[in-house]
Amino acid sequence: MTYRLCVIGNSHVAALKLGWDQRLTERDVITVGVTPTFFGAPRDGLKNMEAREGKLVPTVDWVTEHFQRMSGGLTAIDPADYDGFLLVGLGASMKRTLRLYRTHRWFGVQQNADCVTVSRAFAEGFLAEGYAGTRLAQVARMLSGLTEKPVFSSPEPYWSALMPDHVGKKGDFGWAVAAASGDGGRLADLFAAA
């Protein structure tokens, strides 16, 4: 039996699709028994999607075009066609956790006199509330209104501690500082908990 997996995401889904296509070419055992169909649009493009007549349907032409290109011609996501769903990226990332870490500290991480101290429960609740507003959570809610099939998620990839070129520049969310302080793993744990 083949598991029909619907993979939905922003630009981060492209890496999964390219990797999957490479594995198929190599006839990798990981591809046996799974048939993924990929849907996506860059950045926050999936804000232009709605549940209509039991399907997830783009509301603007450019998102429809991205769906067609990635999926092999499909213009909407019909939950009846899949056994499960994987949501990728869609605003769920360590960035929010790193922004909080810049200005706040909680028990278990390195303390900084310039930061406001809060409880770990506060930090986790604050982040959970923020992640509930991401496109990932919104798409998950749309799917849950259409099907009871499983919905899995994968956030944007974590940064490597080996990214010193970004320190202090645009795109530096403080990962190198957190990793150097020894807090990288603790922040990843908080992110996963939220």
Image: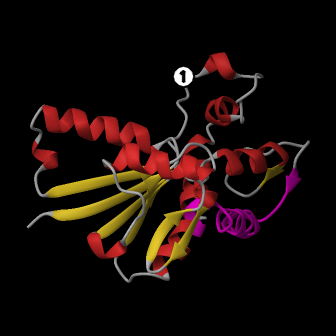
Please say if 160 is above or below 97.
above
Residue 62 drawn at (x, y percent): 56, 46
Q: Amino acid at mark 1?
A: Leu
In the rendered structure, does residue 118 fall within the stretch colored magenta?
yes
Quadrant where the image shows the N terminus: bottom left
Which residue is at 12% across, 39% downward?
A: 28
Q: From which residue to which does the magenta span run?
A: 116-138
Q: Is residue 2 shown to the viewer in this render?
A: yes
The secondary structure type at the circle numbered 1 is loop
Left or right: where 59 falls relative to 74? right
Q: Examine the image and state in which quarter residue 7 appears.
A: bottom left
Q: Nearer the viewer, residue 21 or 164?
A: 21
Write the residue at 47% across / 74% down. 143
**Residue under pointer 1:** 162
Which corner quadrant of the image does residue 118 belong to? bottom right
Q: Main secondary structure of the magenta part?
A: helix
Q: For mark 1, does the 10 Å Cα neighbourhood hold few (<14), some (14 to 19), or many (20 or more) residues?
A: few
